[in-house]
Image (cartoon, helix red, strand yellow):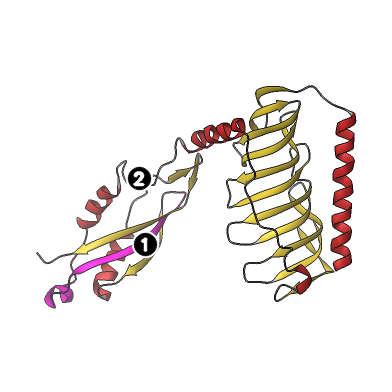
Amino acid sequence: MKKLSIGLCSLLAALLTANAVADAQNPVNTVDTVLVNYLGTYKGEYPVGKGVLLSDTWGVIKGEFKNGLPHGRCVLHDFRPFKYVGQFTEGHITGYGQFFHNNGRVETGWYENGRASGVDTVYYRDGRVYIGLFENDRKVKGKGTEYEKMPDFLKGLKPYYHEPLLSVEEQNFYNEAYAKLTAGDHKPTFQGQNINTFSQWVNARLKYPKDARKNKIEGRVTLTFTVNKNGEVKDIKVLRSVDPLLDAEAVRVVGMSPLWEPAIQYGRKVNFKVTFPVIFSLE
């Protein structure tokens, strides 16, 4: 496996060197420009050079471009919880690269159109490591090995994400892009109002359990629930209990909630977790 890893590194180095020589022999006059293509809005050198792309589909891509499309080494901050560092070819994740997922999983190797295609290494958050051949994002049976813990020859080789240095122009565009992406962001709303309106709605429907009233049980029940992309209240859980009777009543009423206006992140509807107190008072 050591020989395989060294061979891949040598091949990658040779490819990058060849590309660099070809570029040096064929210089292209570049101009700073802003344009819109099927991926999004691009700002940077054109037709080839460094730039930043704000993609309504992916997120923000910084790095090397050709005709306004990522082409060469780039960094992708995806809307989904991961970052990609590596090669693009004419707007597609194709070549050698690394995926850094927010859950701790790291994938490194060869990709074609965003799918693992070639020898790839997957580092799982629990310490397992898989090395093997992939085709169209699927492991090729019998062409790989999974280790329960990281083998010695891989120690020190696991990649870690480091934010690259940006030019002032790239940083300014990134800030402007982020502002544009988040301009319409908001938390979920209830009947066009904030969480206080939902509290009033809940309080108007609470029925104090008779046995709890009789035994003078009162307090604050803290719930968590998710307002999903459709505005539905789901996955109601008791975060802080007072008494089973009060807990059950709080869950019952919150579960009756009509639809909310879902949260918006990066212009898209997303699931949003809410922490919500329900107060039972005998006064």
Residue 149 appears anywhere in the view? yes
Which image quarter holds the C terminus? bottom left
User: Counting other residues with Cα less than 10 Å from the Cα at mark 1, is it few (<14), some (14-19), or many (20 or more)?
Assistant: some
Image coords of residue 105 (percent x, y)? 64, 62
Residue 100, horizontal then vertical, whole percent: 65, 55
Q: Which mark is residue 246?
A: none
- 136 or 234, nearer to the observer: 136
Q: Mark 2 packing: few (<14 Cα in 10 Å), some, or many (20+)? A: some
Q: Amino acid at mark 2?
A: Thr
Q: Residue at x 42, y 46 (%)?
A: 262
Furthest toward the left, the residue is 283
Question: In which quadrant of the rendered view does residue 45 lie?
Answer: top right
Magenta highlight on residue 223: yes
Measure the alpha-carbon separation of dots 1 and 2: 16 Å
Q: Is residue 238 left or right of residue 58?
A: left
Regarding mark 1 in the picture, which secondary structure is present there? Answer: strand
Q: Is residue 156 magenta?
A: no
Dot 1 amino acid type: Thr
Using the image, determine if residue 34 lies above or below residue 274. Answer: above
Q: The magenta stretch spans which residues? A: 206-229
Cβ–Cβ under 8 Å for marks 1 and 2: no
Using residue 47 as the reference point, say whether residue 4 is left or right of it: right
Residue on which disc 1 sits: 224
Q: Is residue 250 above or below residue 26?
A: below
Give the vertical position of 137 relative to 244 (above or below): above
Say whether residue 152 is left or right of residue 263. Answer: right
Give the percent coordinates (x, y) of residue 236: 38, 63
Q: Secondary structure at mark 2?
A: loop
Residue at 66% x, 71% y: name it: 127
Q: Measuring 89% from the left and 48% from the top, which residue is drawn there? A: 14
In the picture of the structure, the residue carrying the numbered disc 2 is 189
Question: Nearest the camera: 103 or 74?
Answer: 74
